[in-house]
Amino acid sequence: MESAQPTGASSAPRNSLSVTLAVWNALFLREAVARLSATRGAWVLILLEPVLHACFMLVLYTVLRTRSVAGADVAVWLVLGLTGYFTAQNIFQRAMGAVDANKALFAYRQVRPIDAVLVRAALEALLGLLVLLLLLAGLAFFGHSVVPDAPMETMLSFIGLMLAALGMGLVISVLGDLVPELGNFISFLFRPLYILSGAIFPLSALSVQYREWAFYNPYAHGLELLRSSFFPIYHAAPEANFQYLYGFAAASIFLGLALQIRFAQRMRAQ
């Protein structure tokens, strides 16, 4: 009679990909719970931020008797710009604090600093997309046309904007952890981007010499391309292009990954 198989036999070891996916899934759930329950009504504040800014600017444009901006519906134009900008801003700002917020988890060798940054960026991108869809649905309810004229360009614009923010987040998360004072200084430098990205006014209205400087900012490219994909007669700034947006995203992500690998042990130990 054959002997029975021993109970409690160890299962086959998981490969590195399955371990990484399991880590990302656990971190994503942890970050989502923390983000949406940090304060009472935290999820409402995520939605209200772009809404309040858009309402304020709509009142201003109404006072100025402006119903369109460069050939675009001003309400849709503002929602696209503000939601796109705040999503990008949340990605690189929250990525900067991802390493410090997850220090305790780095005691587990499966969890690396880069995992915390990538998961936070993915969560903010998802939340930003959901907020954008909700706001567009609200505008459609009030009779605004919210169907993009070029859906593929809309997706590419949003993805490029998120990737550019991810690249900056990867870089800033390392610099901010190694030199906290430098992280605060970088946050201060990024405050003018709200204006320089064209979130609340059309960059096409600037003179050529100043507009060329403004378009060194990748988020200006992303927002302008996102808006031009929605409106068939939108007078977009000619400097906006996908090559610069994706080129910046690729270069910043490469630099960020290199810094993450180079200083991984130091960030774990601090």
Image (tube, grey):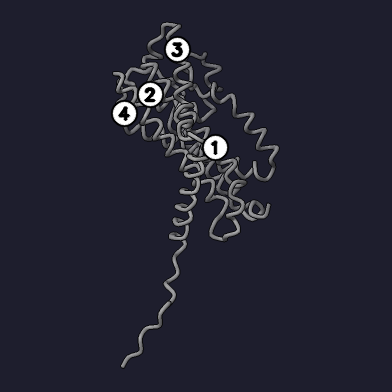
Residue 134: % across, % down:
36, 30
Q: State the residue position of label 2.
A: 228
Cα separation, mark 1 vs mark 2, equals 24 Å
- Please tell me which residue is depicted at 44% across the width and 24% down the height of the picture: 51
Which numbered circle lies on residue 59?
3
Cα separation, mark 1 vs mark 4, equals 28 Å
Structural crowding at the residue carrying mark 1, measured as other residues with C-alpha within 10 Å and reported as few (<14), some (14–19) or many (≥20): many
Counting residues from the N terminus, which is met first, the one under dot 1 or under dot 2?
A: 1
Which numbered circle lies on residue 13?
none
Quadrant for the N terminus in the image: bottom left
Residue 240: % across, % down:
45, 25
Counting residues from the N terminus, which is met first, the one under dot 2 or under dot 4?
A: 4
Counting residues from the N terminus, which is met first, the one under dot 3 or under dot 2?
A: 3
Which numbered circle lies on residue 92?
1
- Name the residue type under label 4: Ala
Residue furthest to the front in view is 40
